[in-house]
Amino acid sequence: MFGGIIAFLSRLRRLIRKETLIILKDPANRLILIIPVLMQSVLFGYAATFDLTDIPYILVEQSHSASARDFLARLDGTGIFHRVAELPNNAEVPSLIDKGAALIAIQIPADFERQLRSGREGQVQVLLDGRNSTTAGVALNYLSTITSSLNAARGAAPPIELRTRAWFNPNLETRWNIMPAMLASLTLIQILVLAGLSVAREREQGTFDQMLVTPLNPMEILLGKAIPPVIIGMFQTTVVLMVALHWFKIPLAGSLIPLFGTLFIFTFSVVGLGLCLSAVSKNMQQAMIFCFVLLLPMILLSGLATPIKAMPVPMQIATYANPLRFAIVAVRRIYLEGCGFADVAVNFIPMLVVSAIALPLAAWLFRNRLT
């Protein structure tokens, strides 16, 4: 029995070595495994954000009063609002917004000061470019905050004061929400493609039939093709983690052990899905198509950009079959909240269920192909 285990491990080691060499022997492949992960980490960190640092606006100032100057001083003093044009009236405002020269237009009427002195509300008209509703909403929130601070300074504060504090993300930066999720999302893309191409590559190159005459059984082939993508995926996860920690300076509140443990479980579920796709694909082109058809629904139903609760009930039910959803929840809690294994263990169950279904299914598909 002991000799059989040694023989099994020896065959498995050779198969893992073969699969790893196939992936890494080409210099172009080595670059593809590293450079895109670095680029995507930086791009998502900078581009995939709802935080605004530059809001171009048009000013139509018809009041020329002290109150208007106070309001504009607070607006320009934020360093976020950037005045791109100052017009005598709003005739040219539609054309400038239509061209994308400004996100908002602010019009202060001539009787603004008189309205305030008479005890009425001083009305300021704000025109928003609603083609990007999310960005426009964020800009409006910033403007509302400035208006509230001005009202408080004038003694017009409401009787109930709200004092807010954001947990786990003090400045409410979108990057703190996006980058931890990228640890799982970017790993999903790479591992699914690597696993999806493994058997399809063999079949297309004509080496798949050679496995028929080897002493390898389907389970050994399955493990030999599953382990290299997992190892590569964990390495890529480490690269993304280094970018989040040292480039974007997002502090890790939790421990590395539950973080990598969660991602390790997640990678096995993804590898199982990728091997199933590879087993039913006749060539590499077909495998790539299957991978990309599966990738988009998994990312959309993961809660990466939109809350699960905001989706229709059938879509919410469909997310339970998506391991990426639970990986993102667990990683965010570990990274931002400092949770341990016990706090996120419930998220392991769906990922393990997917692994328990996908890996045996892939082995069954291999067996049918090999026999």
Image (cartoon, rainbow, N blue to C red):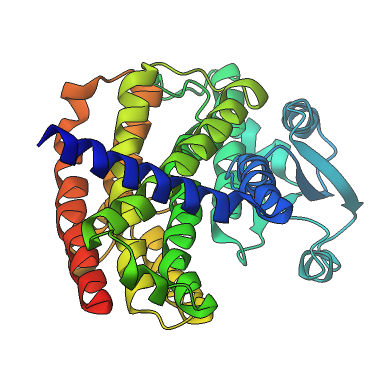
Side of 364 where 272 appears, left or right: right
Residue 211 seen in the current view = yes
User: Residue 272's spot in the image, x, y percent?
Assistant: 29, 57
Q: Residue at x 28, y 62 (%)?
A: 311
In this orientation, which residue lies closer to the viewer: 188 or 15? 15
Along the line of sight, the residue nearer the viewer: 240 or 334: 240
Left or right? Give the position of 109 relative to 275.
right
| 21 over 194 or under it: above or below | above
For the residue pair 284 and 159, the one nearer the viewer reads as: 284
Residue furthest out toward the front: 3
Q: Position of residue 137 (x, y in %)?
A: 54, 51
Residue 155 percent coordinates (x, y): 54, 18
281, above or below 166, in the image: below
Identity of the residue drawn at 24% across and 36% down: 6
User: Residue 330 at what x, y percent from top left?
Assistant: 29, 35
Quarter of the picture holding the C terminus: bottom left
Task: Tell me which corner region of the image, top left, top right, bottom left or bottom right, holds residue 23.
Answer: bottom right
